[in-house]
Image (cartoon, rainbow, N blue to C red):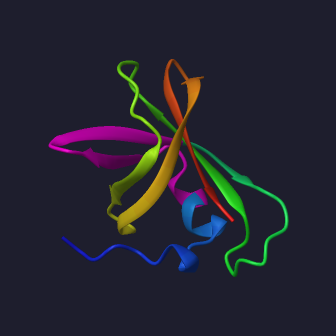
Amino acid sequence: MAPPVDLAALAIDDFIPHLNATFNLRSGEALVALRLARVDRAGASGRAGGAFSLLFATAQGAWLPQAIYPVEHAAFGTIEIFLVPIGPLDGGNGYQAIFT
């Protein structure tokens, strides 16, 4: 497995081409498919990549608690992302990651 991505190096433009793409979240032994449902700017930030928000949708089912999860995608390798459950989204469970 590739080393985790440097979160400080990521920008909103890195994610826009992957809107509606599937990312895989590892939770213990389980692999959970996440669909990147939204990519939004999130105001001003001193962060080099700017501030932005990602919304992910999963199949309806048991909720994962807010935590840092390894999320995998072919374009990024493994990204350690803090995900927060936000309620129903697109017929499934919604999770948000904010980069500030």
Q: Quadrant of residue 42?
A: bottom right
Dominant secondary-structure state across the stretch colored magenta? strand
Determine whether 14 is above or below 91 in the image.
below
Residue 20 part of the magenta-drawn span: yes
Determine whether 53 is above or below 20 in the image.
below
Number of numbered labels in the structure image: 0
Q: Quadrant of the N terminus?
A: bottom left
Q: Residue 83 location in percent, x, y?
A: 50, 47
- In this rendered view, identify the residue nearer to me: 72 or 67: 67
- In this rendered view, identify the residue nearer to me: 7 or 90: 7
As drawn, the residue found furthest toward the right would be 44
As drawn, the residue found furthest toward the left would be 29
Determine whether 64 is above or below 10 in the image.
above
Chain part drawn in magenta: 16-36
Q: Is residue 100 left or right of residue 29?
A: right
Q: Quadrant of the C terminus?
A: bottom right
Q: Is residue 19 left or right of residue 71?
A: right
Question: Residue shown at 69%/81% (left/top)?
Answer: 48
Residue 52 part of the magenta-drawn span: no
Q: Residue 98 location in percent, x, y?
A: 63, 55
Question: Residue shown at 24%/75% (left/top)?
Answer: 2
